Amino acid sequence: MAAKLIAAEADITTLYVDAIVNAANAQLAGGGGVDGAIHRAAGPELLVACRRIGGCSIDQASITPGFRLPAKYVIHAVGPVWRNGARGEPALLASCYRCAIEIANQHALRTVAFSCISTGVYGYPFDLAAETAIATVRDVLMSAPSIEGVTFCCFSARDLTMYQKLLLI
C-alpha cells in the first residue's frame, strides 16, 4: 500500500504522529520560527539531546525523542539558505527530505509530519520548496515501506492551498 500524502494547516508541535521533522539549524540549538517552537514545546530535554548529537549538516538528519511533544520523535533536518538557486539549493533541500524519510524508515516509523524546510529565515521561495518537498518525498517513499502517511504541515491557508494543488499533480 502506498503512503498517503496530505497537507494540513496546523501547529506542527500539536500533531500526534510518530515523528515531526524540524527545520533545524546546523547546531541543533533551537532558534526562531518552527525550530524554536519545537524546542519550547518539547521542553529543555530536547536541547540536551541535541547537544549530545553535536550538530548536523545539510546532507544529514538526526533523530531525538519528542519529549513533551505528542510526536514520539523529532527528526532534525538542516535546510539550505537560499542564494538565488545558484549554489545547489534544490539538491540540498531534496537531501533534507530524503534523509528524514530514510531515518523514519530505519526506525520503522509509520507517520511523519514535515515543516516547510528553509522557507522561513533561510529565504527559500515557498513554491519552489514545496515542489521539491513533494517530489522528493514521493520518490523516497518507494524505498521506505514502513511509512504509511506523510503530512506537510503548513503555517498559513495560502501555503496549504499551494501544497494541496501540488499534491494533485
Image (spheres, rainbow, N blue to C red):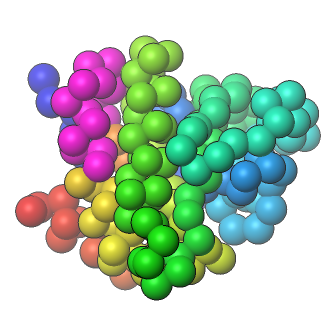
Quadrant assignment, res 148: top left
In the displayed structure image, the side of residue 109 where residue 38 appears, left or right: right
Quadrant assignment, res 137: top left
Above or below residue 51? Residue 136 is below
Name the outermost residue toward the left.
169
How far from the left and from the top, in percent, is residue 92?
46, 56
At a point 19% along the width and 66% down the height, the residue shown is 166
At a point 41% along the width and 34% down the height, the residue shown is 101
At a point 49% along the width and 16% down the height, the residue shown is 107
On-image quarter of the C terminus:
bottom left
Above or below residue 161? Residue 14 is above
In the displayed structure image, the side of residue 120 where residue 41 appears, left or right: right
Q: Is residue 6 visible?
A: no
Magenta residues span 136-149
Quadrant assignment, res 79: bottom right
Decide whether residue 138 is among the magenta residues: yes
Q: Nearer the viewer, residue 43 or 87?
A: 87
How far from the left and from the top, in percent, is residue 3?
22, 33
How far from the left and from the top, in percent, is residue 5?
25, 46
Above or below residue 140? Residue 132 is below
Q: Nearer the viewer, residue 118 or 157?
A: 118
On-image quarter of the N terminus:
top left
Decide whether residue 50 is among the magenta residues: no
In the displayed structure image, the side of residue 164 where residue 35 appears, left or right: right
At a point 33% along the width and 77% down the height, the residue shown is 127
